[in-house]
Protein backbone atom coordinates (compact mmCIF):
# COMPACT_ATOMS: atom_id res chain seq x y z
CA UNK A 1 0.00 0.00 0.00
CA UNK A 2 2.80 2.41 0.93
CA UNK A 3 4.61 1.59 -2.31
CA UNK A 4 1.41 2.26 -4.29
CA UNK A 5 0.86 5.60 -2.54
CA UNK A 6 4.44 6.63 -3.24
CA UNK A 7 4.10 5.78 -6.91
CA UNK A 8 0.80 7.64 -7.12
CA UNK A 9 1.96 10.93 -5.60
CA UNK A 10 5.39 10.79 -7.19
CA UNK A 11 3.95 10.05 -10.61
CA UNK A 12 1.34 12.79 -10.28
CA UNK A 13 3.99 15.39 -9.42
CA UNK A 14 6.22 14.24 -12.29
CA UNK A 15 3.38 14.41 -14.84
CA UNK A 16 2.18 17.83 -13.68
CA UNK A 17 5.74 19.19 -13.55
CA UNK A 18 6.64 17.99 -17.04
CA UNK A 19 3.42 19.35 -18.56
CA UNK A 20 3.82 22.72 -16.84
CA UNK A 21 7.51 22.99 -17.83
CA UNK A 22 6.85 22.20 -21.49
CA UNK A 23 3.98 24.68 -21.52
CA UNK A 24 6.09 27.48 -20.02
CA UNK A 25 8.94 26.78 -22.46
CA UNK A 26 6.56 27.08 -25.39
CA UNK A 27 6.89 23.47 -26.53
CA UNK A 28 3.39 22.51 -25.52
CA UNK A 29 0.08 24.30 -26.08
CA UNK A 30 -3.01 22.98 -24.37
CA UNK A 31 -6.53 24.19 -24.96
CA UNK A 32 -7.96 23.01 -21.65
CA UNK A 33 -11.53 23.50 -22.86
CA UNK A 34 -10.97 21.00 -25.67
CA UNK A 35 -8.84 18.60 -23.63
CA UNK A 36 -11.32 18.49 -20.74
CA UNK A 37 -14.01 17.07 -23.02
CA UNK A 38 -12.14 13.76 -23.12
CA UNK A 39 -11.93 13.24 -19.35
CA UNK A 40 -13.95 9.96 -19.46
CA UNK A 41 -11.11 8.41 -21.49
CA UNK A 42 -8.86 8.74 -18.44
CA UNK A 43 -11.24 6.55 -16.43
CA UNK A 44 -11.07 3.92 -19.17
CA UNK A 45 -7.27 4.00 -19.08
CA UNK A 46 -7.33 3.74 -15.28
CA UNK A 47 -9.48 0.61 -15.50
CA UNK A 48 -7.24 -0.96 -18.14
CA UNK A 49 -4.20 -0.21 -15.99
CA UNK A 50 -5.73 -2.06 -13.04
CA UNK A 51 -6.79 -5.01 -15.21
CA UNK A 52 -3.35 -5.31 -16.77
CA UNK A 53 -1.49 -5.11 -13.44
CA UNK A 54 -1.08 -8.10 -11.23
CA UNK A 55 1.20 -9.53 -8.58
CA UNK A 56 4.36 -7.48 -8.31
CA UNK A 57 3.08 -4.90 -10.76
CA UNK A 58 -0.10 -4.26 -8.79
CA UNK A 59 1.42 -1.31 -6.92
CA UNK A 60 2.54 0.33 -10.16
CA UNK A 61 -0.83 -0.26 -11.78
CA UNK A 62 -2.64 1.17 -8.76
CA UNK A 63 -0.44 4.25 -8.81
CA UNK A 64 -1.01 4.84 -12.52
CA UNK A 65 -4.75 4.32 -12.08
CA UNK A 66 -4.80 6.80 -9.20
CA UNK A 67 -3.08 9.45 -11.31
CA UNK A 68 -5.53 8.92 -14.16
CA UNK A 69 -8.54 9.10 -11.82
CA UNK A 70 -7.35 12.39 -10.30
CA UNK A 71 -6.80 13.86 -13.76
CA UNK A 72 -10.23 12.61 -14.83
CA UNK A 73 -11.92 14.33 -11.87
CA UNK A 74 -10.08 17.58 -12.60
CA UNK A 75 -11.03 17.28 -16.26
CA UNK A 76 -14.67 16.71 -15.41
CA UNK A 77 -14.77 19.75 -13.14
CA UNK A 78 -13.04 21.90 -15.78
CA UNK A 79 -15.42 20.74 -18.49
CA UNK A 80 -18.50 21.38 -16.34
CA UNK A 81 -17.24 24.87 -15.44
CA UNK A 82 -16.55 25.68 -19.09
CA UNK A 83 -20.07 24.57 -20.00
CA UNK A 84 -21.61 26.83 -17.38
CA UNK A 85 -19.49 29.80 -18.48
CA UNK A 86 -19.99 29.22 -22.20
CA UNK A 87 -23.71 28.46 -22.23
CA UNK A 88 -24.45 32.17 -22.29
CA UNK A 89 -21.47 33.28 -24.35
CA UNK A 90 -23.51 32.86 -27.52
CA UNK A 91 -26.62 34.83 -26.62
CA UNK A 92 -27.20 32.60 -23.58
CA UNK A 93 -29.19 29.82 -25.26
CA UNK A 94 -32.80 29.72 -24.08
CA UNK A 95 -35.19 27.11 -25.37
CA UNK A 96 -38.30 27.22 -23.18
CA UNK A 97 -41.54 27.62 -25.03
CA UNK A 98 -39.77 27.73 -28.38
CA UNK A 99 -42.89 26.35 -30.01
CA UNK A 100 -44.94 29.36 -28.95
CA UNK A 101 -46.27 31.40 -31.86
CA UNK A 102 -44.72 34.78 -31.19
CA UNK A 103 -46.42 37.30 -33.44
CA UNK A 104 -44.38 40.34 -32.52
CA UNK A 105 -46.27 43.53 -33.30
CA UNK A 106 -44.15 45.98 -31.33
CA UNK A 107 -40.56 45.13 -32.12
CA UNK A 108 -39.79 48.84 -32.06
CA UNK A 109 -40.64 49.35 -28.40
CA UNK A 110 -36.92 49.71 -27.84
CA UNK A 111 -36.89 52.87 -29.92
CA UNK A 112 -39.78 54.37 -27.94
CA UNK A 113 -38.03 53.55 -24.67
CA UNK A 114 -34.82 55.05 -26.01
CA UNK A 115 -36.61 58.26 -26.89
CA UNK A 116 -38.17 58.44 -23.44
CA UNK A 117 -34.83 57.68 -21.78
CA UNK A 118 -33.30 60.80 -23.31
CA UNK A 119 -35.57 62.85 -21.09
CA UNK A 120 -34.87 63.64 -17.46
CA UNK A 121 -36.54 61.85 -14.61
CA UNK A 122 -38.77 64.09 -12.45
CA UNK A 123 -36.44 63.33 -9.56
CA UNK A 124 -33.57 64.82 -11.53
CA UNK A 125 -31.90 61.57 -12.56
CA UNK A 126 -30.96 61.50 -16.22
CA UNK A 127 -31.64 58.31 -18.11
CA UNK A 128 -28.75 57.25 -20.31
CA UNK A 129 -29.40 56.05 -23.85
CA UNK A 130 -28.78 52.31 -23.73
CA UNK A 131 -27.35 52.39 -27.27
CA UNK A 132 -25.25 55.50 -26.81
CA UNK A 133 -21.50 55.49 -27.43
CA UNK A 134 -19.94 55.15 -24.01
CA UNK A 135 -16.23 55.04 -24.86
CA UNK A 136 -15.51 58.11 -22.79
CA UNK A 137 -17.46 56.93 -19.76
CA UNK A 138 -15.79 53.50 -19.69
CA UNK A 139 -12.74 55.06 -18.09
CA UNK A 140 -14.89 55.43 -14.95
CA UNK A 141 -18.18 54.02 -13.78
CA UNK A 142 -21.29 54.50 -15.87
CA UNK A 143 -24.77 54.74 -14.35
CA UNK A 144 -27.81 53.78 -16.43
CA UNK A 145 -31.51 53.24 -15.79
CA UNK A 146 -33.80 51.02 -17.87
CA UNK A 147 -37.54 50.50 -17.61
CA UNK A 148 -40.56 49.20 -19.49
CA UNK A 149 -44.19 50.03 -18.74
CA UNK A 150 -46.66 47.39 -17.65
CA UNK A 151 -49.26 47.15 -20.41
CA UNK A 152 -52.85 46.21 -19.69
CA UNK A 153 -53.72 42.63 -20.54
CA UNK A 154 -50.18 41.34 -20.02
CA UNK A 155 -50.36 37.85 -18.51
CA UNK A 156 -46.95 36.28 -19.15
CA UNK A 157 -43.44 37.75 -19.30
CA UNK A 158 -40.00 36.37 -20.05
CA UNK A 159 -36.74 37.88 -18.82
CA UNK A 160 -33.41 36.84 -20.33
CA UNK A 161 -30.42 38.33 -18.55
CA UNK A 162 -26.70 38.06 -19.30
CA UNK A 163 -24.57 39.74 -16.67
CA UNK A 164 -21.00 38.53 -17.07
CA UNK A 165 -19.02 39.21 -13.89
CA UNK A 166 -20.22 41.46 -11.08
CA UNK A 167 -22.87 41.92 -8.41
CA UNK A 168 -26.51 41.32 -9.28
CA UNK A 169 -29.60 41.75 -7.13
CA UNK A 170 -33.35 41.51 -7.54
CA UNK A 171 -34.43 44.14 -5.04
CA UNK A 172 -38.23 44.02 -5.17
CA UNK A 173 -41.36 44.85 -7.11
CA UNK A 174 -42.32 47.88 -9.20
CA UNK A 175 -45.43 49.30 -10.83
CA UNK A 176 -43.53 49.04 -14.12
CA UNK A 177 -43.07 45.73 -15.91
CA UNK A 178 -39.29 45.92 -15.51
CA UNK A 179 -36.75 48.31 -14.05
CA UNK A 180 -32.98 48.05 -13.75
CA UNK A 181 -30.28 50.33 -12.38
CA UNK A 182 -26.73 49.58 -13.48
CA UNK A 183 -23.34 50.87 -12.45
CA UNK A 184 -20.43 49.60 -14.50
CA UNK A 185 -16.86 50.45 -15.41
CA UNK A 186 -16.95 47.77 -18.13
CA UNK A 187 -19.45 49.55 -20.39
CA UNK A 188 -23.19 49.75 -20.73
CA UNK A 189 -26.00 47.26 -21.13
CA UNK A 190 -28.45 46.76 -23.97
CA UNK A 191 -32.15 46.25 -23.33
CA UNK A 192 -34.93 45.29 -25.73
CA UNK A 193 -38.54 44.24 -25.34
CA UNK A 194 -40.87 42.40 -27.68
CA UNK A 195 -44.59 42.41 -27.01
CA UNK A 196 -47.14 39.97 -28.35
CA UNK A 197 -50.39 41.69 -27.53
CA UNK A 198 -52.42 38.95 -29.24
CA UNK A 199 -51.65 36.55 -26.40
CA UNK A 200 -50.74 39.06 -23.68
CA UNK A 201 -47.03 38.28 -23.40
CA UNK A 202 -43.71 40.11 -23.46
CA UNK A 203 -40.04 39.13 -23.71
CA UNK A 204 -37.22 41.26 -22.30
CA UNK A 205 -33.57 40.83 -23.27
CA UNK A 206 -31.04 42.51 -21.00
CA UNK A 207 -27.30 41.98 -21.42
CA UNK A 208 -23.93 43.68 -21.46
CA UNK A 209 -23.00 45.57 -24.62
CA UNK A 210 -19.53 44.05 -24.81
CA UNK A 211 -19.20 40.28 -24.39
CA UNK A 212 -15.39 40.51 -24.25
CA UNK A 213 -14.19 42.72 -21.42
CA UNK A 214 -10.76 43.35 -19.99
CA UNK A 215 -10.66 42.54 -16.29
CA UNK A 216 -7.07 43.66 -15.71
CA UNK A 217 -8.01 47.03 -14.24
CA UNK A 218 -7.75 47.62 -10.51
CA UNK A 219 -11.11 49.32 -10.03
CA UNK A 220 -13.57 47.01 -11.75
CA UNK A 221 -17.22 47.66 -10.99
CA UNK A 222 -20.26 46.02 -12.51
CA UNK A 223 -23.54 45.91 -10.59
CA UNK A 224 -27.20 45.57 -11.56
CA UNK A 225 -30.31 45.96 -9.40
CA UNK A 226 -33.61 44.71 -10.84
CA UNK A 227 -37.24 45.31 -10.01
CA UNK A 228 -40.09 43.33 -11.58
CA UNK A 229 -43.85 43.54 -11.67
CA UNK A 230 -45.71 41.02 -9.53
CA UNK A 231 -48.62 40.85 -12.00
CA UNK A 232 -47.52 38.50 -14.81
CA UNK A 233 -46.37 34.91 -14.66
CA UNK A 234 -42.61 34.98 -15.22
CA UNK A 235 -40.16 32.76 -17.06
CA UNK A 236 -36.63 33.82 -16.15
CA UNK A 237 -33.22 32.90 -17.56
CA UNK A 238 -30.26 34.39 -15.67
CA UNK A 239 -26.62 34.10 -16.69
CA UNK A 240 -23.92 35.13 -14.23
CA UNK A 241 -20.32 34.39 -15.17
CA UNK A 242 -18.67 35.24 -11.87
CA UNK A 243 -19.34 37.31 -8.76
CA UNK A 244 -22.37 37.41 -6.47
CA UNK A 245 -26.08 37.15 -7.22
CA UNK A 246 -28.99 37.64 -4.81
CA UNK A 247 -32.42 37.04 -6.34
CA UNK A 248 -35.46 37.27 -4.06
CA UNK A 249 -38.33 35.79 -6.08
CA UNK A 250 -40.60 35.01 -3.13
CA UNK A 251 -43.28 37.54 -4.13
CA UNK A 252 -43.32 36.74 -7.85
CA UNK A 253 -45.25 34.18 -9.86
CA UNK A 254 -42.34 32.33 -11.46
CA UNK A 255 -43.19 29.38 -13.66
CA UNK A 256 -39.67 28.51 -14.79
CA UNK A 257 -36.31 29.70 -13.55
CA UNK A 258 -32.98 28.87 -15.14
CA UNK A 259 -29.71 30.13 -13.66
CA UNK A 260 -26.27 29.51 -15.15
CA UNK A 261 -23.11 30.54 -13.35
CA UNK A 262 -19.42 29.81 -13.57
CA UNK A 263 -17.64 30.89 -10.41
CA UNK A 264 -20.10 32.69 -8.16
CA UNK A 265 -21.89 33.01 -4.85
CA UNK A 266 -25.59 32.56 -5.65
CA UNK A 267 -28.54 33.13 -3.31
CA UNK A 268 -32.09 32.35 -4.45
CA UNK A 269 -35.28 32.83 -2.46
CA UNK A 270 -38.29 31.10 -4.02
CA UNK A 271 -41.99 31.61 -3.38
CA UNK A 272 -45.25 29.65 -3.36
CA UNK A 273 -47.37 31.71 -5.74
CA UNK A 274 -47.94 28.94 -8.32
CA UNK A 275 -48.84 25.26 -8.06
CA UNK A 276 -45.60 24.19 -9.75
CA UNK A 277 -42.26 25.92 -10.19
CA UNK A 278 -39.42 24.41 -12.23
CA UNK A 279 -35.89 25.51 -11.33
CA UNK A 280 -32.76 24.58 -13.25
CA UNK A 281 -29.33 25.59 -11.95
CA UNK A 282 -26.06 24.97 -13.76
CA UNK A 283 -22.79 25.98 -12.14
CA UNK A 284 -19.07 25.38 -12.30
CA UNK A 285 -17.33 26.21 -9.04
CA UNK A 286 -19.93 27.93 -6.87
CA UNK A 287 -21.67 28.31 -3.55
CA UNK A 288 -25.43 28.09 -4.04
CA UNK A 289 -28.10 28.69 -1.41
CA UNK A 290 -31.77 28.15 -2.28
CA UNK A 291 -34.49 29.14 0.19
CA UNK A 292 -37.74 27.20 -0.25
CA UNK A 293 -41.03 27.84 1.63
CA UNK A 294 -42.08 25.16 4.08
CA UNK A 295 -45.57 25.39 2.60
CA UNK A 296 -44.50 23.67 -0.64
CA UNK A 297 -43.19 20.23 -1.48
CA UNK A 298 -39.60 20.28 -2.68
CA UNK A 299 -37.76 17.88 -4.97
CA UNK A 300 -34.05 18.24 -5.73
CA UNK A 301 -32.11 16.32 -8.37
CA UNK A 302 -28.33 16.67 -8.07
CA UNK A 303 -25.83 15.86 -10.79
CA UNK A 304 -22.19 16.82 -10.45
CA UNK A 305 -18.60 15.88 -9.84
CA UNK A 306 -18.03 16.94 -6.23
CA UNK A 307 -20.86 18.59 -4.31
CA UNK A 308 -21.15 19.47 -0.64
CA UNK A 309 -24.83 19.16 0.28
CA UNK A 310 -26.88 20.66 3.10
CA UNK A 311 -30.52 19.90 2.32
CA UNK A 312 -32.43 20.64 5.54
CA UNK A 313 -35.45 18.30 5.81
CA UNK A 314 -35.09 16.64 2.41
CA UNK A 315 -34.86 12.85 2.41
CA UNK A 316 -32.78 10.83 -0.02
CA UNK A 317 -35.04 8.80 -2.33
CA UNK A 318 -32.37 7.43 -4.65
CA UNK A 319 -28.97 8.38 -5.98
CA UNK A 320 -29.07 12.12 -6.64
CA UNK A 321 -32.80 12.45 -5.82
CA UNK A 322 -34.09 14.13 -2.64
CA UNK A 323 -37.63 15.05 -1.56
CA UNK A 324 -39.32 16.74 1.35
CA UNK A 325 -41.61 14.60 3.56
CA UNK A 326 -45.11 14.30 2.09
CA UNK A 327 -43.98 15.63 -1.28
CA UNK A 328 -46.61 13.75 -3.28
CA UNK A 329 -49.47 15.02 -1.12
CA UNK A 330 -48.59 18.73 -1.25
CA UNK A 331 -50.69 20.92 -3.55
CA UNK A 332 -47.77 23.19 -4.47
CA UNK A 333 -44.39 21.91 -5.57
CA UNK A 334 -40.94 23.27 -6.42
CA UNK A 335 -38.73 20.99 -8.51
CA UNK A 336 -35.03 21.85 -8.60
CA UNK A 337 -32.54 20.32 -11.04
CA UNK A 338 -28.97 21.13 -10.10
CA UNK A 339 -25.97 20.35 -12.31
CA UNK A 340 -22.57 21.38 -11.02
CA UNK A 341 -18.84 20.85 -11.24
CA UNK A 342 -17.40 21.58 -7.80
CA UNK A 343 -19.83 23.36 -5.52
CA UNK A 344 -21.58 23.73 -2.19
CA UNK A 345 -25.36 23.62 -2.38
CA UNK A 346 -27.69 24.47 0.49
CA UNK A 347 -31.47 24.05 0.51
CA UNK A 348 -33.01 26.03 3.36
CA UNK A 349 -36.66 25.96 4.39
CA UNK A 350 -38.30 29.12 5.66
Image: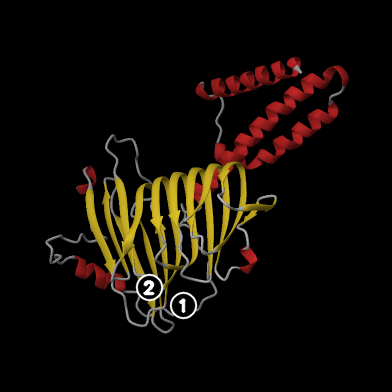
* Residue at the disc numbered 2: 194
Residue 17 x, y percent position in the rendering:
58, 20
Residue 66 x, y percent position in the rendering:
71, 27
Residue 181 x, y percent position in the rendering:
27, 57
Q: Is residue 127 left or right of residue 264?
A: left
Q: Give the residue displayed 56% in from the left and 33% down from the top.
A: 30
Q: Is residue 83 left or right of residue 329?
A: left
Q: Is residue 326 visible?
A: yes
Q: Give the residue displayed 35% in from the left and 51% down from the top.
A: 168
Neighbour tally class for label 1: few under 14, some 14-19, many 20 plus, Cα within 10 Å: some
**Which disc, if any, is residue 102?**
1
Q: Are marks 2 and 1 in contact (CB under 8 Å)?
A: yes
Q: Nearer the viewer, residue 174 or 222?
A: 174
Question: How many labels, in total?
Answer: 2
Which residue is at the far bottom? 198
- Labels 2 and 1: the sequence-earlier one: 1
Amino acid sequence: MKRSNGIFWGGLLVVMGVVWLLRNMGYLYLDWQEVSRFWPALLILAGLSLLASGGERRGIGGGVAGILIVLAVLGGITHRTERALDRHSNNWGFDWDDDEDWDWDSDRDKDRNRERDRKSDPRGQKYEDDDADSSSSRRGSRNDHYEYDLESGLQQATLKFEGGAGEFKLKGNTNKLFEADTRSSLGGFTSTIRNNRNVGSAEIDFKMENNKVNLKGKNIENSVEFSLSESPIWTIDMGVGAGTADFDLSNFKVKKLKVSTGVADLDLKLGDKLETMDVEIESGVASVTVEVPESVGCEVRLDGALNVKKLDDLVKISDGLYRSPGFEQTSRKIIIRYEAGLSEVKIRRY
